[in-house]
Amino acid sequence: MIEPKIFTVGQINRYIKSVLENDFILSSLLVKGEVSNFKAHSSGHYYFTLKDRAGAIACVMFRQDAQAMPYIPENGMQVIVYGHISLYEKSGQYQLYAEMMEPVGIGSLQMAFEQCKERLAQEGLFDAEFKREIPQNPECIAVITSPTGAAIRDILQIIKRRDAGIKIAIFPTLVQGKQAADDIVRSLKLANEWNQADVIILGRGGGSMEDLWCFNEERVARAIFASKTPVISAVGHETDVTIADFVSDLRAPTPSAAAELATSSVIESREQFTRLYLRLERDFRAVLTSCTRRLNYAMKRTVFTRPLERFRVAEEAVNQKQRRLQTQLAHRLELSAKKLQYLENRLEAVSPLSMMQRGYLLAQTQNGTLLTSIAQAKVGDRLLLQLKDGDLKTEIIEKAVRMRGEKESNI
């Protein structure tokens, strides 16, 4: 009797893994689905689930393949994944080992461009408040580009034509390929450390999105933003748009246009100077004519032809005011004198001395109190009587009180 063979769990998983990896279809396939449960592990690996309406499959992308991705997958993104199916022996779970991933309906580079643009915009690297002003008359221009491309020839030709006195410093730089981004960052750093240029032109000629990709790298954008010297981006043709265009201080549609934007034409400056000189001369003559006319008019006025006339007029006005004041003062004095005489007459009429002339007198007690009522004195008191021409001292020997016109005595 043949005994059945007993397998271990590890043997079964290893066998299934071998079957899956050797299958013609499962060893190399493209799978379309929606990304969910995405996680970028600290190790650099990507873990996610690829799903559709019918089902889901666990996926993993190892660090080496993940680093080659120009963008980071997001949940909800429709993608096409290239890879193979295998089994993770420890858990017995089969999964898709992704090697490449392409977004559906949009290229991976375009996706990476949009993600980087949105991320830097949220950080404020594109804000107008951080844009530096491009000097109008630079003395030195730094050009960061390939020393052998057509862009440098166009830039040099236009700058020399517009202003031959401008100094040009060329920083030879790779502008295409895997090392281009690092080389651009290095050149920007060198130009700022040199600190002799008034403006930097960064650019190259046209090309595909892949050719221009180094100008979309995040490290290049941050180097432009960190530059102390203003940067003009001049990448590709007018229809080409890169991250460098958004973060730079000024975007030029072409390298030739960048050279024109960075300089002022000597011929145009001379023409402008001539126009300003003629305008200044015209305005000066107009002002001189106006001042001469005003001076001639002023010289004909009385103040210049008869300077003492104004003094005589002023003197007459002062004399008139003086006479008017004297008249008013005399009138007021007269009125005051009359009023004073009137008050004196009234005061004289009510004066006790005046009443004494008519036989009245003033009586005071010994302590000097004016006697106004008989109740203030009694028989035996001594009184001081003041008449118009002297005083009398007397003693009360009798007093009588009159009530309602009748005489009462012996009080």
Image (cartoon, grey):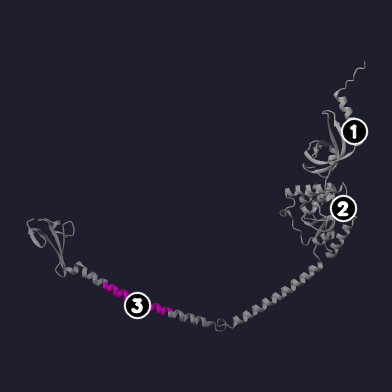
Q: Which mark is residue 208?
A: 2
Q: Is residue 222 visible?
A: no
Magenta-drawn segment: 321-342
Instruction: Please indicate whether residue 140 sits to the left or right of residue 124 in the image.
Output: right
Furthest toward the top, the residue is 1
The percent coordinates of residue 53 (x first, y second) are 79, 40
Mark found first going from the N terminus, 3 or 1 = 1
> Viewer-proximal residue, 141 or 81?
81
The quadrant of the rendering that contains the C terminus is bottom left
Count of all numbered marks drawn on residues in the image = 3
Between the residue at mark 3 and the residue at mark 1, the CA separation in whole angstroms equals 135 Å
When the figure is inspected, residue 290 is found, relative to residue 55, above or below; the finding is: below
Q: Provide residue 225's location: percent of width, then percent of height.
A: 76, 51
Q: Compare marks 2 and 3 and give the one earlier in the sequence.
A: 2
Identified by mark 3, the residue type is: His
Labelled disc at residue 21: 1
Mark pair 1, 2: CA separation: 38 Å
The residue that mark 3 highlights is: 331
Judge whether residue 325 is colored magenta.
yes
Q: Main secondary structure of the magenta part?
A: helix
The label on residue 236 is none
Of mark 1 and mark 2, the one earlier in the sequence is 1
Q: Quadrant of residue 166?
A: bottom right
Viewer-closest of 58 and 295: 58
Q: Nearer the viewer, mark 1 or mark 2?
A: 1
